[in-house]
Image: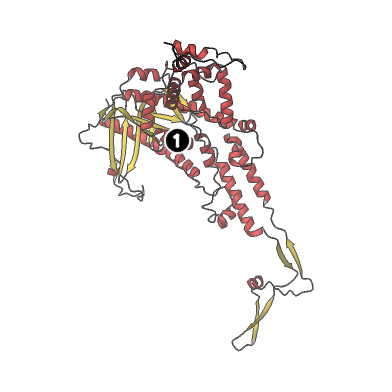
Amino acid sequence: MATEGQALQLVALLENELIRRRGDIDRHNDYYRGNHRLKFASAEFAKFHGERYRDFSDNWTQVVADSPVERLTVTGFQASGEITADKDLWEVWQVNGLDADSQLGFLGAVTGARCFVLVWGDPDDPDMPVVTFEDASQCIVAYEPGSRRHRRAALKRWQDGNQDYATLYLKTEVWKFSRPLAQQDKSPQMADVDEELKRWQPRELGDEPNPQPNPMGVVPMVELPNKPMLVDEPISDVAGVTSMQDAINLVWAQLFTASDYASFPQRVVMGAERPMIPKLNSAGEIVGKQPVDLDKFQIDRVAWITGKDARIAEWQAANLAAYTGIIEVAVGHLAAQTRTPQHYLIGKMANLSADALLAAETGLVQRVDEKKLWFGQGLREVARLIALARGQDELAKALRSGRVLWADSESRSHAQMADALLKLKQLGFPFEWLALRYGLTPTEVADVVAMREREMEMDPVSEITRQLTGAGAPAPPVPEEEAEQAVAPPPARRQADAPPPTSAPAQEAETVAEPEPAGAA
């Protein structure tokens, strides 16, 4: 068990590393939001037009970041040795709102290079742990030397009101600290800075001990890296976009400036002096000359030009199409570098077949599958932590080699999907696998299977017929009497000239109704 001094030293080390990372995270988040500074401009252009385009950006960064996230959807967790998804884990996922929050976490990882997931037990409901996605600007995980998976400690640091808070997670205990929020308007060079503001103090938690034991025995925070490297930091998808984004913004600024100054033909007077008019005093006497106000010529649209060599020339309007051509090339480079489909960025689509669209999205699909691989390892560990928090040690052991279930990365029409699933069914794939492939969650598949079973119970004969034609899964056994009725041949068709048979009860009725002859007694 760590002492308070050791815990504070570890908090200080992790906080320094977190502060170092914060600069890139904030910059990438600004680019995602469209807060771009004008770069690559000449000193003269920046001097006269920099402030004019300070709030302008043609934001392609957001499209690049959103395109893979919209295809990252978790549908369940499956433990090793099981053939169906775990319903209890999915219930924890749903109750914690992670179907929505996971999208926020994945977006944070794409822009900030990583995100985190924190799992902790709820004392009021031991069967329902609290699971939250955390931002990279607030959390950090320290690993054992020489390992990228075995976690040694984790820190979450955040601000609330006028306080800084920090929670240090270790394998055996959890420390909680707080300190007054340092005033941001103070300069670090000021000699009278209150050093006490920099010191963490254990938080007062009432009846809760501090530190408190960690019953899971492992650090309960998991890192989800976006594009991990063997010996370096994970890479943000935004990091490779910023330079081209700055270039696109500059070309747009130059286009707007050219449009303002040179989008119309300009006329110039050559070989003539500037028109002058007499300058009069208060008595109306000519006391000199003064130049004509050229703005008046623009309003009156009339000008007097004197001089035998005077002539008028014309400057052609600027070719603005050259700028738009450069922008299209730059956006094409950006699409190729980030494996984002061109129709996501340019928006030009004309009579494209389904196969052509599928080929155009191949790079994006592969990019999404890579993220599923990276995020899936961390989410599998999250599922194990959920089982540990619920005291299910055997399930936690099975989940270490389990898998995360995802929705399909490819975008297909319903007609394409139905045709593909029908062919797979003819090859012998089971119904539940096909339903998962269609995009249903394991919970929805279980509901559909239950509905099919009820349909078979209500109409077993129709279900047998459907199975014989290959339209469904194998039917359950039916009673022998019902099976005989289902396969009995239809009655032979009677001849058209034969009289209709009369049933025995009808003959008896006619015999009874016939009157007796007189004198029969």
Residue 496 coordinates in the image, percent (x, y): 62, 17
Tell me how the rendering is colored: secondary structure
Number of other residues with Cα within 10 Å of mark 1, as a class: few under 14, some 14 to 19, many 20 or more? some
In this rendered view, identify the residue nearer to me: 309 or 451: 451
Asked whether the viewer can see residue 229, the reply is no
Residue under pointer 1? 103
Which residue occupies the extreme left position in the image?
A: 207
The image quarter in which residue 478 lies: top left
In this rendered view, identify the residue nearer to me: 428 or 217: 428
305 is higher (above) or lower (below) than 51? below
Which residue occupies the extreme front position in the image?
A: 519
46 is higher (above) or lower (below) than 506? below
Q: Amino acid at mark 1?
A: Gln
54 is higher (above) or lower (below) than 117? below
Report the residue at 55% width, 18% height from top.
Answer: 470
Image-based side of 461 in relation to 201, left or right? right
In this rendered view, identify the residue nearer to me: 275 or 81: 81
